[in-house]
Image (cartoon, rainbow, N blue to C red):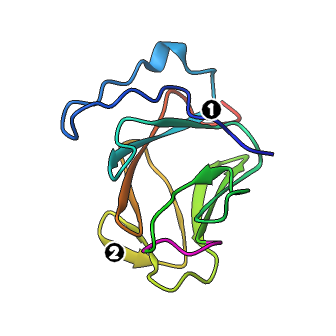
Amino acid sequence: MTLTPVEGNEAPEDEISIALDELPEGVGLLVVKRGPNAGSKYTLDHPVTTAGRHPESDIFLDDITVSRRHAEFRRERTGYTVADVGSLNGTYLNRARIDDAPLANGDEVQVGKFRLVFVTGTAPGH
């Protein structure tokens, strides 16, 4: 399974607009804030969404700073979590290196040199 960006227009790093009203209820969204594909948006509408440099990753981040299998975004009953899956450079949540952590609206996840902002309208199960 390969997810394609919801939107792929090149927006300046600090001027990314997010239309939450278009997001299905309870579904999270990752917006690339910094990196080669800044402005790209990925919906997290599966139980597990993979991110990495491997072409079959759900979120394909093509840069040497990203491991082939880098991180997973998990949709659970109580909300979303992000987990590092053994990457070389680590996964960071709001600039702190993590192994596994819950996500909150507005959190910034760093995977290699990519910075992604997590947004959601409502939590899963609500």
Q: Is residue 9 left or right of residue 102?
A: left
- Give the quarter of the image for residue 27: top right
Work out how far the residue at label 2 is from the one at label 1, CA to CA, in angstroms: 25 Å
Q: Which residue in the structure is indicated by mark 1?
A: 27
Residue placed furthest toward the right: 1
- What's under tag 2, amino acid-wise? Ala
Residue 38 falls within the magenta-colored stretch: no
Label 1: element kind: loop
Instruction: Look at mark 2 in the image and give the residue it sits on.
Output: 96
Q: Amino acid at mark 1?
A: Val
Q: Position of residue 112 (x, y in %)?
A: 41, 70
Magenta segment, principal secondary structure?
A: loop
Please tell me which residue lies in front, 24 or 122. 24
Q: Residues within 10 Å of mark 2 (few under 14, many from 20)?
A: few
Q: Is residue 38 above or below residue 115?
A: above
> Residue sitting at 21 percent across and 34 percent down?
12
Describe the element under mark 2 as helix, strand or loop.
strand
Residue 67 falls inside the magenta stretch: yes
Q: Is residue 49 above or below residue 122?
A: below
Counting from the top left corner in percent of width and height, residue 43 is at 60, 35
